[in-house]
Image (tube, rainbow, N blue to C red):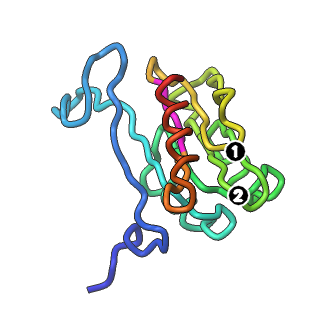
Amino acid sequence: MAASPARAFATGAPTIGAAADADSGEGEGEGEGEGEDEGMKFATWNVNGIRAREAQVLELVARESPEVLCLQEIKAPLEKVPESLRALEGYTCLWHGVNAYAGVGLHVRREAAPTPPVFAHPAFDVETRVATAEVGGVTFASVYVPNGGKDLAAKLRFLGAMDVW
């Protein structure tokens, strides 16, 4: 049996979920009746290099049409992100990355946030590992946590800073 396209990605499958609408109090698994609000669909994926995953990211967006797309380990500054992804059609995009290291992307579908969201990242984020945006009263964050196998102390400092933030 052939693997589904999502399972064929070299870095693992993207994660798809639903977020509660801040006003409705509903979350994933609730409000699934016909005509009821199901919340916002979001997707998050460690792409391990955005230039190598251009086609798969476009496929994911076309197939799932998430309101919010979080990408981690993009390993590229804006000018090196493929043109088809740089200004992803139908999305307000933030590319927060540097050359060949870490980096995150956070993309909000314009239908979900007709007024462009305010993107931010905390002051402790000196390695382009965190980006946030508020959409419909819910704060979304694309976070790429350091690998503790290489430097456990750095990972613990990062997690401690996230906790305080």
Q: Would you say residue 76 sits in the magenta stretch?
A: no
The disc at residue 151 is: none
Q: Which residues are magenta?
A: 139-143
Most distant residue in the top direction: 23
Q: Quadrant of residue 161?
A: top right
Most distant residue in the front direction: 153
Q: Look at the magenta stretch and give its main secondary structure.
A: strand
The answer to whether residue 136 is above or below residue 101 is: above
Q: Nearer the viewer, residue 76 or 20?
A: 76
What residue sits 57% from the left and 30% below the top?
132
Which residue was labeled with disc 2?
Answer: 101
Q: Amino acid at mark 1?
A: Glu
The disc at residue 127 is: 1
The answer to whether residue 99 is above or below residue 24 is: below
Q: Nearer the viewer, residue 4 or 14?
A: 14
Q: Secondary structure at mark 1?
A: loop
Q: Secondary structure at mark 2?
A: strand
Measured as percent of width and height from the top left, residue 111 is found at 53, 31
Most distant residue in the right direction: 79
Q: Would you say residue 140 sits in the magenta stretch?
A: yes
Q: Amino acid at mark 2?
A: Tyr
On the rendered image, what quadrant is the C terminus found in?
top right
Local packing at callout 2 (Cα closer than 10 Å; few below 14, some 14-19, many 20+) is some
Q: Earlier in the sequence, mark 2 or mark 1?
A: 2
What residue sits 48% from the left and 38% below the top?
67
What residue sits 28% from the left and 32% below the top?
38
As drawn, is 1 to the left or to the right of 161?
A: left
